[in-house]
Image (cartoon, rainbow, N blue to C red):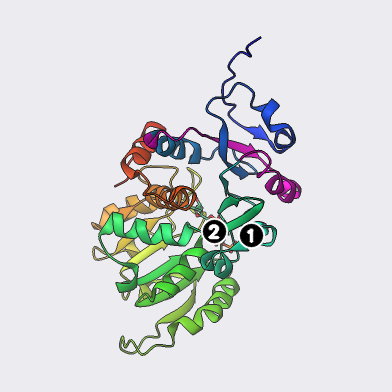
Amino acid sequence: MTQPASPLQDVYQAADLTRWPQATAGVTPPVRLAVFGDPVAHSLSPQFQQAALDHYGIAARYARIHVPVAGLGTALRQLPAAGFIGVNLTIPHKMAALELVDGADEHARLLGAVNTVTVDGERLLGFNTDGPGFVRAVRAEFSVDVRDLRILILGAGGGAGRGIAVQCAREGCARLVLVNRTAAKATALAADLEPFFHSQRLLGPSARLAAIPWEEPQLRRELAQTDLVVNASAVGLQPTDPSPLPAALLAPHLLVLDTIYVAPRTRLMQAADEVGARSANGLSMLLQQGALAFEIWFGRPAPLPAMRAALERAGAVGIN
Ligand code: NAP
């Protein structure tokens, strides 16, 4: 008797991996990629990764799997037997995953975090595409290279902010200013990144690397010597949040990248509009880190237009 076809579920559970053929019976083509997270229902990765798979006619589905912290190791170890090509990892798994994979690339080791895993036989290899995705997003949105910019990062002490800061340092950006609500985190990160700023690129009297408190006088002084402002803090995620920087602190010469992507025009972007500064939200970064993951899994260029169109269909608008 033929089994009736079952639709892909919105979210699978970690326990489903122990009986993956039964849990996904009738799903065609088979699920061979997924994002692990807790929570995971909000993840937009399935939308644009599926578009990339479909674009190339790759017979695979991309699913969401709800994996709690305690279940990550077991879930990862079940991937080879379940026939997976790889997975993405989102909150709260990125750091823990580094200890659970069999090998990791340089980006992942430096950041202490993995967002992409590829299955190689029985081995699991970890990668981090968040930082390189940020670099590609800056290029796509503003047609400039990170290495040519003086960059100020708000929320530099969080997971995303740290990743972006490490990437900027590795790229050899002209100047890097780290700002965090809990100032000690920015200071500690600056100490870690010091070795990247030993070269003799001269910029006048100001140090190439600094950590400053999240306070108006210091921000005003630093923003006068900044080309790109990045908001990697959670301020702006809630509809009731203010802009992380008031328009009065911004200026027309600034490029403003808000990593938040819950709105096409975030509060910070609205503040940038008020002074005539160019700005972008976090969708481009999201798309680019996913494109790099696709390239790791399949060794071919990610079909960005198809992926972008899928994100726009999912309701996320306003990306270049
Ligand atoms: P996280 O590790 O929890 O970091 C949160 C950051 O926000 C910390 O720096 C925290 O400062 C700061 N923060 C929280 N509330 C604040 C407040 N009221 N005032 C000032 N600072 C505050 O989270 P995450 O994963 O890094 O995510 C941070 C942001 O990045 C989110 O908005 C997320 O949407 C965005 N993100 C975007 C992408 C993308 O692809 N576009 C990817 C990842 C993350 P303390 O250290 O003082 O707590």
Which of the marked residues, 2 or 1, is nearer the chain's N terminus?
Answer: 1
Q: Is residue 155 visible?
A: no
Return the residue nearer the eye: 200 or 20. 20
Image location of residue 268, percent across then percent down: 38, 54
Q: Secondary structure at mark 1?
A: helix
Where is residue 143, by image quadrant? bottom left
Q: Amino acid at mark 1?
A: Met
Q: Residue drawn at (30%, 73%), measured in percent from left and top?
A: 148
Q: In the drawing, does residue 196 fall left or right of residue 189?
A: left
Q: Is residue 162 magenta?
A: no
The disc placed on residue 219 is none
Return the residue nearer the eye: 184 or 148. 148
Q: Amino acid at mark 2?
A: Phe
Where is residue 222, by image quadrant? bottom left
Q: Residue drawn at (41%, 42%), measured in percent from left and top?
A: 263
Q: Is residue 110 visible?
A: yes
The disc placed on residue 127 is 2
Where is residue 205, by image quadrant? bottom left
Image location of residue 97, percent across then percent down: 65, 56
Q: Residue drawn at (55%, 77%), measured in percent from left and top?
A: 187
Image location of residue 26, percent across then percent down: 60, 21
The disc placed on residue 95 is 1
Q: In the drawing, does residue 98 fall left or right of residue 139?
A: right
